[in-house]
């Protein structure tokens, strides 16, 4: 099983003074396209009296498929609904296609690659653990950010991040100044510009005002980022980036200086 090999690494250059990892929690907003290897600890129910199963959540459409790993496990399929209930918790309601039995699985994530669960159904109660198989290829809830002073010339805010693995990732990158002022931060950068560079130094994209973009607003909501003020000159980009190393630079549009927050989020795939 792959563990943590393909998540967006978000290795910010720690020349970012006060750089920090922002934990948005481990629970994903969607489980579509995931495969969970489930190990039963105790109880009896839809999976087995003991052993494990592999549950695949379809990438399109709310369907699942249970596949036997041990002889005590019955294969099954049906539909599901997933609800993220907290930073590290969620509930999957499964409806078996053959029997119509409904079960509620209460999940607690202890890392980006797995956690524990308790299942309640009409045929029993079960507890156990699970591990995402290839989960990190689709991990949608990591971000990193730092707040710092943006000067001019070589004293602008510069940070690097790395996208690992073998598949492209959707990312939200923000340079926030004016909205920080409304949150009580003083001396903020009034008109930030964020520019993304490839490892070869080429400019990939740049933004100097998010312009109430519906795409940005939707991305903000999907990862739980605080909303940017309507009409503000905060900068934001939604990009699809291939695996590799990147640099994010923040400067003032007209050479202005001040405090800004730079953030990089991995978006749900």
Image: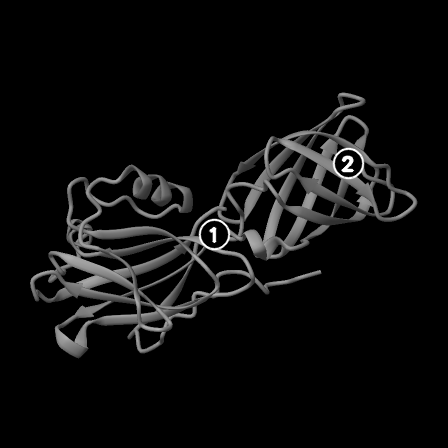
Please give the residue where the numbered disc 2 appears in the rendered image.
125
Residue 170 on image: x %, y %: 43, 51
Measuring 30% from the left and 68% from the top, which residue is drawn there? 202
Residue 233 on image: x %, y %: 15, 50
Quarter of the image where the N terminus is located? bottom right
Frontmost residue, 255 versus 226: 255
Residue 114 on image: x %, y %: 64, 54
Nearer to us: label 2 or label 1: 1
Give me the C-alpha separation between circle 2 and circle 1.
30 Å
Please identify the quarter of the rendering in which residue 203 is found.
bottom left
Disc 1: CA contacts within 10 A as few (<14), some (14-19) or many (>=20): many
Residue furthest right in the image: 71
Measuring 17% from the left and 76% from the top, which residue is drawn there? 155
Horizontally, is 258 left or right of 77 in the view? Answer: left
Frontmost residue, 59 versus 129: 59
Mark on residue 141? 1
Measuring 54% from the left and 48% from the top, which residue is drawn there? 27
Regarding mark 2 in the picture, which secondary structure is present there?
strand
């Amino acid at each position: 099983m792959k563990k943590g090999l393909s998540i967006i690494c978000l290795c910010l250059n720690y020349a970012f003074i006060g750089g920090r990892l922002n934990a948005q929690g481990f629970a994903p907003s969607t489980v579509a396209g995931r495969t969970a290897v489930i190990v039963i600890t105790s109880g009896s129910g839809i999976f087995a009296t003991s052993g494990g199963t592999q549950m695949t959540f379809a990438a399109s459409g709310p369907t699942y498929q249970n596949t036997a790993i041990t002889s005590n496990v019955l294969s099954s399929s049906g539909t599901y609904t997933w609800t993220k209930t907290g930073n590290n918790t969620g509930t999957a309601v499964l409806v078996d296609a053959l029997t119509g039995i409904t079960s509620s699985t209460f999940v607690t994530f202890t890392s980006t690659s797995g956690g524990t669960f308790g299942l309640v159904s009409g045929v029993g109660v079960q507890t156990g653990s699970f591990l995402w198989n290839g989960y990190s290829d689709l991990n949608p809830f990591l971000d990193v950010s730092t707040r710092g002073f943006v000067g001019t010339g070589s004293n602008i805010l510069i940070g690097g991040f790395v996208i690992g693995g073998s598949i492209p990732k959707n990312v939200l990158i923000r340079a926030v100044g004016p909205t920080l002022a409304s949150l009580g931060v003083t001396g903020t950068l009034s008109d930030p510009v964020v520019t993304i560079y490839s490892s070869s130094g080429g400019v990939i994209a740049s933004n100097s005002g998010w312009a109430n973009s519906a795409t940005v607003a939707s991305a903000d909501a999907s990862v739980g980022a605080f909303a940017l003020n309507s009409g503000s000159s905060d900068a934001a980009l939604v990009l699809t980036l291939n695996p590799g190393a990147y640099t994010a630079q923040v400067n003032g549009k007209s050479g202005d200086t001040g405090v800004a927050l730079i953030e990089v989020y991995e978006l749900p795939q």
